[in-house]
Image (cartoon, helix red, strand yellow):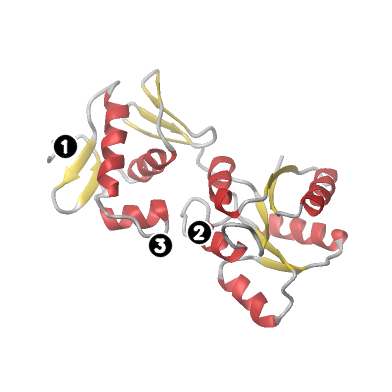
């Protein structure tokens, strides 16, 4: 069943959309606060997002840019919902990465047609459901990590870092690249923050096996079986 995330702070409208989407056979998630949307998207990887422009904490345009900055989320179709009907507003929304734009008030049948059309256009969001390196296994659907038969508890940031490393074993990633990929290009974080999260990742993984995360001095990190450079 395809999942639609409705990001809307008007409760009555959110419930109206939920009702009509469920009639179409979709599973529906609702989020009303802009600063929580990215976490919901990362956790659930919805098939499509209906995104209101005007939201508390973060605007729909800012959220759209954040989602498009994440390699594993950037192909999710986004339909922007807004009372802003000027052409320059539509262009701004589309430039932020929205696939479609619907002005309020809108016709529910038309919106459902737009949802179906964008669902058909969208590529498969997740063709790979599992990644592995040696005895480390990442379940991308349930967002779980295993070392052999042991379950490894990781925070969201450590999970995303491990995913990047395991997707490209042996490749060295700079701190700057990891910051941009994990946190997004428009969010300022000290480069040494990466070191803190790598230490946490190592500690969690190494409880059940040898250390495969390699530190390349003055460069960054990779995952392989070579000798660690501390």
Q: Quadrant of residue 186?
A: bottom left
**Residue at 83% across / 50% down in the picture?**
16
Q: Name the residue tied to disc 1.
A: 226
The crowding category of the residue bearing disc 1, from other C-alpha atoms within 10 Å (few below 14, some 14 to 19, many at least 20), is: few
Q: Which mark is residue 66?
A: 2
Disc 1 secondary structure class = loop
Q: Position of residue 106 (x, y in %)?
A: 83, 65
Query: On the picture, is 188 further left or further right than 98?
Result: left
Disc 3 secondary structure class = loop
Q: Position of residue 93 (x, y in %)?
A: 62, 71
Disc 2 secondary structure class = helix
Mark 3 or mark 1, which has the lower sequence index? Answer: 3
The vertical placement of 211 against 55, above or below, is above
Q: Nearer the viewer, residue 2 or 207?
A: 207
Mark 1 or mark 2, which has the lower sequence index? Answer: 2
Q: Nearer the viewer, residue 108 or 171?
A: 108
Image quadrant where one finds the N terminus: top right
Q: Nearer the viewer, residue 61 or 219?
A: 61
Q: Which mark is residue 35?
A: none
**Residue at 80% across / 51% down in the picture?**
17
List the single residue furthest toward the bottom: 87
Q: Position of residue 184 (x, y in %)?
A: 42, 57
């Amino acid at each position: 069943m395809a999942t639609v995330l409705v990001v809307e702070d008007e409760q009555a409208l959110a419930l109206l959309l939920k009702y009509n989407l469920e009639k179409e056979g979709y599973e529906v998630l609702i989020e009303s606060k802009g600063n929580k949307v990215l976490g919901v998207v990362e956790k659930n990887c919805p098939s499509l997002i209906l995104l209101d422009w005007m939201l508390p904490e973060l605007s729909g345009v800012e959220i759209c840019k954040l989602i498009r900055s994440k390699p594993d989320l950037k192909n999710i179709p986004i339909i922007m919902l807004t009372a802003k009907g000027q052409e320059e507003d539509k262009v701004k929304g589309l430039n932020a990465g929205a696939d479609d734009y619907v002005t309020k008030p809108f016709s529910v049948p038309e919106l459902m047609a737009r949802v179906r059309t964008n669902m058909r256009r969208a590529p498969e969001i997740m063709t790979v459901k599992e990644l592995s390196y040696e005895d480390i296994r990442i379940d991308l659907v349930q967002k779980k990590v295993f070392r052999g038969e042991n379950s490894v508890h990781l925070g969201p940031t450590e999970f995303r870092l491990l995913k990047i490393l395991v997707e490209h074993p042996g490749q060295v990633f700079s701190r700057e690249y990891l910051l941009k990929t994990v946190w997004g290009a428009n969010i300022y974080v000290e480069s040494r923050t990466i070191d803190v999260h790598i230490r946490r990742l190592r500690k969690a993984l190494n409880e059940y096996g040898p250390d495969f995360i390699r530190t390349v001095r003055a460069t960054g990190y990779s995952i392989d079986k070579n000798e660690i450079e501390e």
